[in-house]
Structures are given as C-alpha cells and as structure tokens.
Image (cartoon, rainbow, N blue to C red):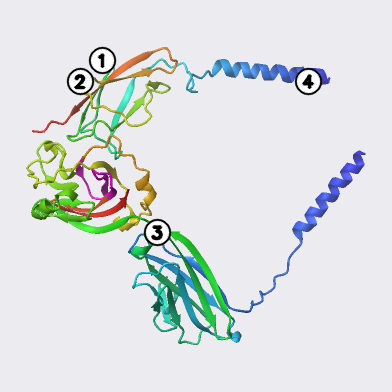
Amino acid sequence: MQLKHYSLALLTILVVFFTACQEEEYALPTLEGGLHNDCIKRTLGPNVVGLNLEFAYAMALPKAEGKIISAQVEASIAGAPATYLENRSFSTNGSGVDVPVTVGSPSVNSGTKTEVVFTKDTCAATLRYFYIIPEEARGKTVKFTFSAKASNGQTVSYEMGPYSIAKMDMKLDLVVSDNNNSYISIADMAVYNAATAATNAANIDLVYLYRVITGISFTHALVSPASSPDYLPGITLPSGVNKSAKIWKVWALRDQHLARLQYGIFIDDLDFQELDFTGAPNYAINLRAEAGIWVETADGKYRAYIYINKIDNTKKEMTISIKRYPMQ
Amino acid sequence: MKRYFITFIVITLVTFSWVRCTDFPVDEDGLLITTRGQCYVSNFELLGADFQTVRTKAAVIDTTAQTINVEVFFGTDLKNVYPQFSLVTDAKLDPKIVGKVDFSDIANPKVYTVVSGNRMVKKPYTVYVTVQAKP
C-alpha cells in the first residue's frame, strides 16, 4: 500500500518536471492578413463641456493587400464645430518627440461624422481624434464608432464609450481685485465691479477683499455679503448685495483642469453632489495661492469650487478659476 | 505514548492562553492595558476645515494645572475644528475625537480626560481657546 503511494507521488513529480522543462521552439509570427484597427482614449479626468476628448485610432493592413483610403469617426452626439480627426499620423522619435507625417486631407465634419480621406499610399496610420464636447452633450453619455476603409474593399470598426459628460461648468482665470472687480457671481460665473454688481445684486455670492491689518492675518479673503462686518472691513456693499453663501476653505486641492499643474486631481460631478455644507461658515479669510473654497449659493442652486491660481499683494488682486455644478 | 503527547499539547495550549490573557490585557477599546502610570498631554494641535493649523503659536500645556491654552487666528471658524492631542505612551483620551469639534462656546471650555496606560490614573485637561484680537 505504502509502496503504491510512493510510486504515484514519484510519477506525478516526474510528469510535472518534464512538462515544466519542455522547451518551445521560437517561431517567427506569421502576419495576419486583413485590415485591423485599435483605439485608445488619451484624455483623463471628467469630460467637461468645452474641453476635448482625445483618442488615438490605429489602422493597418499588410502592404501586399492594399492601402488605407479613409478613416471616419461617428459620435452619438455631434461634436462642437472645432471637432477634428488628424490628417497626420504621428510617430515618436528617439528624443520622445512626436513627429507628424501627413497622410490625408484635413478632416471634414458632416453631422455626427468626421472623416479623413487618405492622399498618401500608406498601409498603416494612427490618427488622433479630438472631440470638442458640445453643450448638447452636457449630462448625457456619448459614444464613438471609429472605422477605416482599405482599397481592397475591407472595412473595420471599433466602438469606444459610452462616456459620461459632466454637468458642471468651468471658467478659468478670472481676475478679482480689491478696488475694482471684487464681486463674484457663481450663477453668472463672472466678476463685477461695484456699479455692475448693483445691477446684478441678486446673483452676487462673494466679495473679494485684500486687507493688511496689523496683529491679525487677513490678507486675501472671499466673504459672503451677508457675513459679519468684521470680515468686510471698509466695504460698503452695493444696494441689494446681501446673499449668504456657505463656504469651506480647502488647501492643496489642485484640480488639474483649474490649476493646470502637474497634479492628477480632478473634481467631478460626484464631488459636488456629496459635499455636506452643514454648519459651514460664510467667509474665508487669509487665503493663499493654490488654496480654494467650496461654495454653495444661498439659494442652494449651485455648488462651486473656486481655485486660487495666483495672488498679487502689490496689486491687491487674485486670479481664480471656477468649477460649478447645478444642484437643481 | 499517544495519550502523553495529547496531554502535553493540551497543557501547553492552556498555559500559553492563560499567560497571554494575564500579561496583555486589553480594555473596552481593544487597547493594551500596560503598567504605565504616566498621564499627561505632550502636544496639542488645532486644525481648521482645510486641515491647516489655526494656532497663532504653540499651545501652552500646563500638566500641573491640567490646562491647555491655545490662541487661534482671527476669523477661525471654531465650530468646525479638529483637535489633535499627543499623549504619553499607552495613554488614551476620553471622549474620543472622531471628527470636527465645536469649540465656539469659549465661555464653557471643553474638557478632555487623559487615561494612563494602566487605566488607573485619569486627569481632565481643560482646553482654553482664545481668538486673536482685532486691533
């Protein structure tokens, strides 16, 4: 009985040993015939209206079988007019630089389709597609069908998506200054001076001010008009400017869309949805560059993130960028 | 032979579990109760909603009077701050800090009790917060 078990174990070990050591002969891969394609999405982060969705679409067939005659992308929602498909194929040289080679005529948009007709005799190309997200796509999903045609009549296609398009808006590089454009409207995504703020009083959510007060750290501040006068020293609010927005101070949330820095952080719709403003104050003082504030407007209609790109103590101003999400 | 072996194993296991339970007791929070009787706060920090300090200078900790005095910047939102206590080794804090704390009622300062590692000594520390005065 014991001998039988030993024999079985030895046999198993030998089988495993021989199987593991079996050498496979290398053979040159055989070229697969026909037209083939592949696609990758190059952009990261949430898809915001006005920004682009970038793809790289590759297509190839054996040289002996023919050449590529056209490439096309069909989007489920037509892109903004600036949408295009590159008519150049890029390769990366030894220095890491993308070198273009023109392979076709500039792309033509027709409804939801964008097409490049090849003018060069080529059997392989990688074209980049830049879909500029249109206003009609806000809050919806969009998908794409990439396709290519070869001179031998073959066609191939590749589906990408669906991708969700964010509901949020974005506005970059608004300059607010202590003595001029110091009134911020989240609803309008704009800054106003005292005179224009009076005519848009219902939409003013924040006042920017810069103060150097001995003994305390005040400097750059974003304050709700309805905040305590302690936080609005020397400010005479225009008539009707009296809203109280809720504010959370934030540090080091450098959204890549807003900051355009190296940090791979993106604020998406979900972040706005999940914010809790319970007990939030209505002022933020002593702000610095690369800091920010989450804001909820007094009527609860909008939530926003205001990122501080730059501050200038001499000019008493700061440059801000805003992402805004409609709650209603 | 087999019976001796099993008896030996059982005795060893019982001994080990008994030694473990007596040498390393844990409290209701699953923390080790040790022999340390020291009971004090070694450092105190107060962070704002942006997780940046709101102190104007280092907090003054009086381990005899069992008080912590901390001055915060003008404009600090004291309803939403995160206190952080550094305690002597093995000690713990009661009540536990699980999130934002409201320190805005300056007239009624908050009291946190430090409990020593042996859980035999309890010292309440009162946290006095003052806001940087506007000139």
Label 2: few (<14), some (14–19) or many (≥20) C-alpha neighbours in 10 Å: few
Q: Is residue A171 above or below residue B50?
A: below
> In the image, is residue B50 part of the stretch drawn in magenta?
no
Which chain is indicated by disc 2? B
Residue under label 4, please give it: B5
Q: Nearer the viewer, mark 3 or mark 2?
A: 3
Label 4 sits on a secondary structure element that is: helix
Identify the amino acid type marked 2.
Ala
Which chain is indicated by disc 4? B
Calculate the distance from the C-alpha at mark 1 to the C-alpha at mark 2. Answer: 18 Å
Residue under label 3, please give it: A165
Q: Is residue A261 visible?
A: no
Which chain is indicated by disc 3? A
Identify the amino acid type marked 1.
Ala
Q: Nearer the viewer, mark 1 or mark 2?
A: 2
Could you tell me residue A143's position as x and y percent? 47, 65
Q: Verify CB contact (< 8 Å) between mark 3 and mark 2.
A: no
Q: Residue at x 23, y 24 (%)?
A: B105
Q: Residue at x 18, y 43 (%)?
A: A243
Label 3: few (<14), some (14–19) or many (≥20) C-alpha neighbours in 10 Å: many
Residue under label 2, please give it: B107
Q: Seen in the image, is A182 located left or right of residue B95? A: left
In-front residue for pair A87/A162:
A162
Q: Nearer the viewer, mark 1 or mark 3?
A: 3
Same chain, marks 3 and 2? no
Identify the amino acid type marked 4.
Phe
Q: Which residues are magenta?
A: A283-305
Residue A166: assigned label: none
Which quadrant is home to the N terminus of chain B? top right
**Of callouts 1 and 2, the N-terminal one:** 1
Residue B65: assigned label: 1
